[in-house]
């Protein structure tokens, strides 16, 4: 899946490149910053569309930490579900970017907004393409960071500053449960790779033992926080 993996990496990295270029080089040029951000998400959408139409599947991994027997990888995993979600994230993201041109027009931090929006897009795409739970958790936290930046964009306003702190703290509660669940999966299965976990569960359905229900609940805690589900919903009204 060489061609498909290249498209997947491009889908992931285009918004990151946009955020980096805006932050490091074009903050004073509002129009160029917006165009870079919009161009990146549109490019990611085109790549996503090609991936969806190609119906490719598989994964591509790079080793980023290797210590003794411990080997942590970062990669991209493609299947029909991830291809569909790539279209959703980049498609909706492109519409948000386009709308933001007019909505944020005249704001003195116009370029910073688009840098934060590109970072958010990168983080969301990282979750969709993650090959393992560790990578998913890293991008999950990046979504939290970028959400903090966007919710508190007008940080000089006390209400916005309070709202972003409330969202950040509330989400950390859910993420703590998510992290504990990931650790329990590692302890029980010895792997966090989705493909290996699926294979192991098929061969040994009782792999997680009596803790399976608890692990599922802990992993769900992360989703509860990010999607503002009861009782971790309290941050959403202030963030709107």
Image (tube, grey):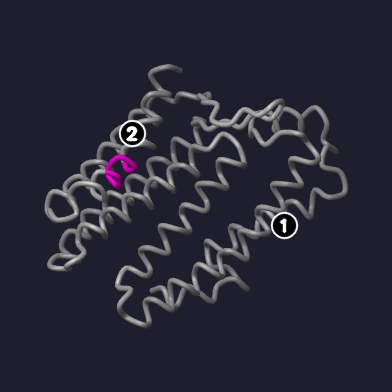
Residue 217 numbered tag: 1
For residue 18, above or below residue 74: below
Residue 166 numbered tag: none
Between 93 and 75, the one nearer to me in the picture: 75
For residue 151, above or below residue 26: below
The tag earlier along the polypeptide, 2 or 1, is 2
- Left or right, 35 with respect to 88, comes to left
Crowding at dot 1, Cα within 10 Å, few <14 / some 14-19 / many 20+, comes out as some
Where residue 60 sits in the image (x, y, percent)? 50, 24
Task: Confirm whether the magenta stretch covers residue 18.
Answer: yes
Q: Secondary structure at mark 2?
A: helix
Where residue 131 sits in the image (x, y, percent)? 56, 34
Discs 2/1, front: 1
For residue 197, above or below residue 94: above
Q: Quadrant of the C terminus?
A: bottom left
Query: Within the image, what quadrant is residue 117 found in?
Result: bottom left
Which residue does the image show at 52% across and 62% down from the upper left?
A: 227
**Which secondary structure class fits the magenta region best?**
helix
The answer to whether the residues at label 2 and label 1 have Cβ atoms under 8 Å apart is no
Where residue 159 sits in the image (x, y, percent)? 38, 82
Which residue does the image show at 50% across and 74% down from the upper left?
A: 166
Crowding at dot 2, Cα within 10 Å, few <14 / some 14-19 / many 20+, comes out as some
Task: Confirm whether the magenta stretch covers residue 203.
Answer: no
- Left or right, 82 with respect to 26, comes to right
Query: Within the image, what quadrant is residue 186 found in?
Result: top right
The stretch in magenta equals 15-20
Q: Return the residue at label 2.
A: 49
Looking at the image, the residue that sits furthest to the right is 210
Which residue does the image show at 69% across and 30% down from the upper left?
A: 70
- Left or right, 5 with respect to 117, comes to right
């Amino acid at each position: 899946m060489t061609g498909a993996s290249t498209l997947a990496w491009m889908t992931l990295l285009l918004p990151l490149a946009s955020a980096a270029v805006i932050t490091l080089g074009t903050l004073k040029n509002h129009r160029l910053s917006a165009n870079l951000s919009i161009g990146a998400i549109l490019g990611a959408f085109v790549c996503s569309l090609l991936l969806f139409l190609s119906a490719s599947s598989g994964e591509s991994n790079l080793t980023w930490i290797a210590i003794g027997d411990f080997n942590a990888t970062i990669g991209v995993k493609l299947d029909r579900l991830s291809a569909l979600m790539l279209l959703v994230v980049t498609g909706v993201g492109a519409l948000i970017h386009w709308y933001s041109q007019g909505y944020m027009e005249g704001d003195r931090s116009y370029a910073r907004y688009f840098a934060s929006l590109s970072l958010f897009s990168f983080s969301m795409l990282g979750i969709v393409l993650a090959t393992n739970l560790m990578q998913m958790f890293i991008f999950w936290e990046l979504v939290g960071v970028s959400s903090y930046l966007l919710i508190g964009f007008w940080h000089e306003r006390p209400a916005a500053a309070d709202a972003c702190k409330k969202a950040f703290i509330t989400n950390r509660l859910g993420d703590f449960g998510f992290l504990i669940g990931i650790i329990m999966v590692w302890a029980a299965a010895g792997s966090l790779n989705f493909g290996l976990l699926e294979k192991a569960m098929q061969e040994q359905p009782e792999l997680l033992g009596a803790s399976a229900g608890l692990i599922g609940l802990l992993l769900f805690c992360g989703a509860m926080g990010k999607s503002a589900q009861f009782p971790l919903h309290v941050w959403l009204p202030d963030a709107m």
